[in-house]
């Protein structure tokens, strides 16, 4: 896997072996950032990578100039991979935080995030729980841009304060842009 654009463009990042972490393909990550580039002011945004896996989304956001990024995952392997990848690109630790938490049991937020990428294990039922926890614990900025990655056939019942604004398919992956209403 490589970083697609920005100051870390072309740098390789690792993915743990085995089935614990499912990395987002370069095609889907590229599509995600193509969607976001038209609506995000990277230099004035905080990015949150939920179920971060390798940390690729957050590192890509840092590469594009985001002010601050946070990474959340409950998997020890994912947290270790994210730490390794951040060290590999030599990102300043003052620009990020890593949380080893289950998405349904988050601590109170230390800051709010403008851009949120949620990529849980497909069909695990974590998206509604993550959204509820993020909102209740103060992680969401006033008008956050939320992207959810799911399997193409996955059906999600969103909490009533969230609605799908856009849906795109890439192979067996579906990207949903979610709005807080």
Image (cartoon, rainbow, N blue to C red):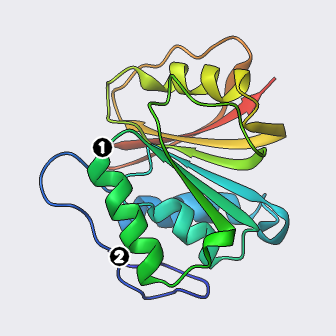
Write down the quadrant of residue 172 in the picture: top left
Label 1, on which residue? 172
- When the figure is inspected, residue 56 is found, relative to residue 124, above or below; the finding is below
Label 2, on which residue? 13
Q: Where is residue 40 in the image (x, y as percent from the top left)?
A: 78, 60
Would residue 123 be found to the left or right of residue 139 on screen? left
Write down the quadrant of residue 79 in the picture: bottom left
In percent of the image, x 52 and y 13: which residue is there?
157
How many residues crowd around disc 1 within 10 Å: few (fewer than 14), some, or many (20 or more)? few
Write down the quadrant of residue 66 in the picture: bottom right
How many residues crowd around disc 2 within 10 Å: few (fewer than 14), some, or many (20 or more)? some
Q: Label 1, secondary structure: give it.
A: loop
Q: Where is residue 31 in the image (x, y as percent from the top left)?
A: 52, 61
Residue 1: which disc?
none
In percent of the image, x 46 and y 36: which residue is there?
101
Q: Observer-nearest residue: 168 or 96?
A: 96
Mark 2 and mark 1 lie on one chain; the one further toward the N terminus is 2
- When the figure is inspected, residue 167 is found, relative to residue 76, above or below; the finding is above
Q: Where is residue 92 in the image (x, y as percent from the top left)?
A: 62, 78
Q: Position of residue 59 (x, y in %)?
A: 53, 69
Would residue 24 be found to the left or right of residue 77 on screen? right
Q: Nearer the viewer, mark 2 or mark 1?
A: 2
In percent of the image, x 60 and y 88: which residue is there?
7
Q: Label 2, secondary structure: give it.
A: loop
In percent of the image, x 49 and y 78: which residue is there?
4
């Amino acid at each position: 896997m490589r970083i697609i654009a920005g100051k870390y463009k072309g740098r390789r990042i690792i993915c743990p072996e085995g089935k614990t972490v499912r990395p987002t393909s370069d095609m889907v990550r590229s599509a995600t950032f193509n969607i976001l580039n038209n609506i995000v002011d990277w230099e004035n945004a905080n990015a949150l990578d939920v179920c971060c896996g390798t940390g690729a989304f957050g590192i890509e956001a840092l590469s594009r100039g985001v002010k601050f990024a946070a990474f959340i995952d409950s998997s020890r392997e994912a947290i270790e991979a994210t730490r390794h990848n951040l060290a590999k690109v030599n990102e300043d630790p003052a620009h990020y935080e890593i949380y080893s938490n289950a998405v349904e049991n988050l601590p109170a937020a230390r800051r709010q995030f403008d851009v949120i990428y949620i990529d849980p294990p497909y069909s695990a039922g974590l998206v509604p729980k993550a959204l509820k926890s993020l909102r209740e614990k103060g992680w969401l900025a006033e008008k956050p841009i939320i992207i959810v990655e799911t399997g193409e056939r996955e059906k999600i019942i969103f909490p009533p304060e969230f609605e799908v604004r856009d849906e795109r398919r890439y192979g067996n992956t579906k990207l949903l842009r979610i709005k807080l209403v």
